[in-house]
Image (cartoon, rainbow, N blue to C red):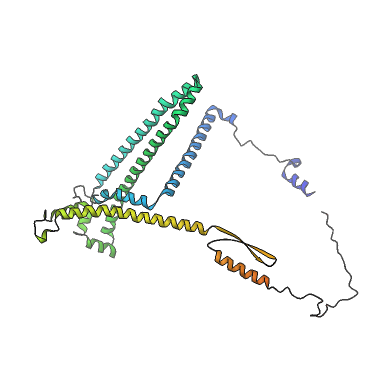
Amino acid sequence: MSSRQTRSSIGRNGVRQVNLAQRTSTQEMGWFGKLWAKITGKVVEWGKSFGGWLWEGITKFLSNFSCEKGARFITSNWDIFWNFNWNISDEQIDKNMMNIANQFISTTAGFLGNMAGKLVCGVLPTIGIAFINKAAAMHIALSKGPEMLREVSTAFGSYVKQSFNMAMKAIAWQLFKHGRRVVKMFLDKSPSTLATAIVSMVPGGKGTIEKWGDEKGEEWSFGKQRREAREKLPEKYDGNINNIWNQDSSEEFWEEFSDNCKEAIILVAQGLDEYIALQRIEENRQQQLVNAVVENGGERFRLVSSLRNLQENVANVLAQTEILGNRDIGQFVGSGDISEVPNSSNLKIQLTFILYNY
């Protein structure tokens, strides 16, 4: 039989043999190998858990992102951007990076101290009490455990938020530092028309670009330019029509402009969020299925379609029912409308049997 031949080709006497000699058993690893395998297994397990937690946090952050949150981030950093010194030196940027690193280390040490305090003085004593009195330990865990978990969750959330803000600041500083270096190289070395046009628009030309970011360079910020322009105006209105636009009126104009500009940005962002939400609702509604039954005489058709494609599918079903209702099934043989099929009395009905060995 073919099955016996197949089994025989696998191994001796039709039995498959597997060689496990190349595999190292745990008995041959020794105590150090067992310990190392256990440690690496735990590390891999913790790494997978941490990776899953990190990915879940990233997806949750992205899913919770909205235009309003982005607008509030812009408005909260409005003054920082307006007073940012665009002529800051690389040395000062490095100092700022070092300050951020020190702040991160201090924040991390505080968070670890918080966790260690709750662990050493809260969790471990409760575990010790459990060896003496399980009921008392259970009471402590049920009554004070949720409060401790809330405190841990709040501390962890605050730590993550502060760390994220510090990371964003560090990334922004590095992007500005290296981006400025690339721009200076482009404007200084590139013979392109764009670089020449930009250099011609800069006061002082290439000399100003070369001094951009010098350690002893003067501060350049939008806030400083506005203050210098305000100081050139008259101090106050003295009855002269030419002094209506003075330092007081310009300062009042700027304060009102800043406040209302921030509010307008948030309102526009909220309007965008509302529009996006309405579009999602409409999209979900269009994806809803409609289940209907169309009857044509003794025949029934069931239509299942989304609202988005409902009109097209209804037209197709109506056309199909019309075609089936008016269909021509052809002519019956022997009805007299066509000639009879010729036959012969010598023809006999024959049946052919083909026999196989299976």
Residue 198 screen position, x and y as percent? 25, 61
Inspect this view and state whether residue 252 appears: yes
Residue in front for this viewpoint, 278 or 182: 278
Residue that extends furthest to the top in the rendered view of this protein: 132
Residue at x 42% of width, y 46% of height: 61
Residue 199 relative to residue 43: left or right:
left
- Quadrant for residue 27, please give it: top right
Residue 353 screen position, x and y as percent? 85, 61
Residue that extends furthest to the right in the rendered view of this protein: 346
Residue 39 relative to residue 227: left or right:
right
Residue at x 35% of width, y 51% of height: 70
Residue 183 screen position, x and y as percent? 29, 56
Residue at x 48% of width, y 25% of height: 139
- Quadrant for residue 305, please give it: bottom right
Residue at x 26% of width, y 48% of height: 80
Inspect this view and state whether residue 225 appears: no
Residue 349 screen position, x and y as percent? 88, 68
Marks counted in the figure total: 0
Image quarter where the C terminus lies is: bottom right
